[in-house]
Image: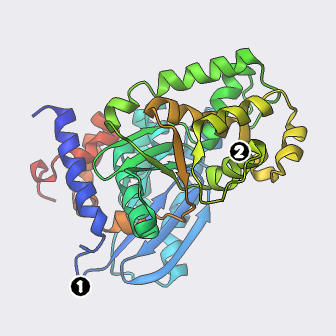
Amino acid sequence: MNVWKACRVALLGLALGLVGLAALAEPTCRIAFDVGSSGVRVGASNSAAEAHADIDYLSPLWAGHGLDETLAPTAAALNNLPLEAGFSAACDRVAGAFSAWRLAWQAAAAETAALIARLQADTLVPVLVLPQAVEGAYAYASARQVLGPRLTTSHVLDIGGGSMQIAGARTTFGQALGQKSWHQVLCATLRQSAVASCDLHPMSAVDLQRARQLLDDKFSGMAATLGPLTTLTAISRPVTRGVAPAVRLLAAKKTESTDPLSAQDITTAINQMAGLSGDKTAKRVHAQSAYATYLLSDMLLLEGVLRATGGAEIRVIEGTLSILPALMADDKAFQWSAHYPCYLERFKVSGPDAYFSDTATCPRP
C-alpha cells in the first residue's frame, strides 16, 4: 500500500470514528490542547470547562524568526491552563499543533522538531504537529456536533487565521491560506510589502486577475480531492460576520440571513469594492474594523473556493467550533503520546505525516 493510500485509509477511519465523538475511553480522563495560530486552548473529557491563552504564532514566522520566541509562553500555557480550568492532574494529555506549526516545519524542519521536543521535556505534554487532513476531520466532526440537522451540505468551509480547510466525512482539502496568511500573500505579491496587514485597496483589474490566478493555482487539486457534487457551508466569522453581510448589502436584494450566498453576488461585490479605498469600503458596507481590513481578500478567497469546486452558492451558518472534543476522541493521538520518542524520530523525517505511521512498529516505551 503506497503512502498516500495509507494516509487516506487512516484518515477515513479517523473521520468515521470522530463523527460520533462518544468513544472516549473511561474511566481514564483525557486533556487536550489546541495549539492554533493565535493561541492555546485546553479542554478535558470529564469537564465542561475550557481555558485559553492568546499567543501570536504567525507574526514571528512572517518576520523570519521561527517559533523559538513562543517557547516560554507556550510552555506556560501547557503547564498552567489545566490548573486554571480545575482539571485533574492525573488525566492523560496530548497537544495538537496546527497551521503555524506546519508552516514552521516547512521553513525549518530540524528546529521545529527540536522545539516540540523541548516543549515536551519542559511540560510533559506530547506535542503533535498534525496534518491538514486530520485538522479537517476534526473540523467536520465538530460541525456535525454543533450544527446538527442544520448541516445539510457535504462539506464545511472553515477559515482560520493561518489556514483554511474544506472538510467532509471522507474527504478534506486544506491550504495554508487563512484570513491572515492569504492577506499576507497578497501584500507580498501585489504590494511588495512585508507588512501582513497592508492596505490592499484599491485593487486594479490587473490586481484582481493576479489574485484570482494565485488562488486557481493553489486550488488546482481541490475538485479532484473533494470529489463531485461538493456542497459547502461556511461556518467561520470571516464569512458569517464579514463577507456575508457585505455581499448581501451590496447585492441590494431582499435576502434572509439564512439564504445561501451566490457565486455571482460575491463576484459582483468584489468588483464594486475593488476600486474603493479602505476607509470608503468600511463605510460602504458598515464593516467593523476587525473585518474591514481583510474583507476584500476574504471575498476573493471565498470566490476562489467556489470557482475551484464549480459551486454556484455557499450556505452560511455561524458555529463556534472546537476541535478539542475530536482531539480528545482521537485514540491514535493518545497512542502517540505513549510513544513520543518514536514520534519525534519520525517527525524529523516525515514532518506532520508522522502521525499517519503505525505506532505498533515503534520500540516499546
Badge 2 crowding class, 10 Å Cα cut-off, few under 14, some 14 to 19, many 20 or more, is many
Image position, residue 33 (x, y; %)? 44, 64
Could you tell me which secondary element the residue under label 2 belongs to?
Answer: helix
Q: Nearer the viewer, mark 1 or mark 2?
A: 2
Do the CB atoms of the residues marked 1 and 2 lie less than 8 Å apart?
no
Give the number of the disc on residue 247. 2
Image position, residue 101 (x, y; %)? 47, 44
**x 64%, y 17%: residue:** 210
Q: CA distance from mark 1 to mark 2?
A: 49 Å
In this view, the residue in front, 81 or 22, is 22
Compared with 75, 43 (above or below) is: below
Compared with 49, 274 (above or below) is: above
Outermost residue, top direction? Answer: 206
Residue 196 in view in this figure: no
**x 21%, y 34%: residue:** 4
Badge 1 crowding class, 10 Å Cα cut-off, few under 14, some 14 to 19, many 20 or more, is few
Amino acid carrying label 1: it is Pro
Outermost residue, front direction? Answer: 254
- Taking the image as shown, residue 28 lies to the left or right of residue 113, namely left
The quarter of the rendered structure image containing the N terminus is top left
The quarter of the rendered structure image containing the C terminus is bottom left
**x 16%, y 40%: residue:** 6
Amino acid carrying label 2: it is Val
**x 81%, y 54%: residue:** 288
In this view, the residue in front, 360 or 112, is 360
- Taking the image as shown, residue 335 lies to the left or right of residue 318, namely left
In this view, the residue in front, 266 or 58, is 266
Q: Earlier in the sequence, mark 1 or mark 2?
A: 1
- Taking the image as shown, residue 318 lies to the left or right of residue 10, namely right
**Badge 1 is on which residue?**
27
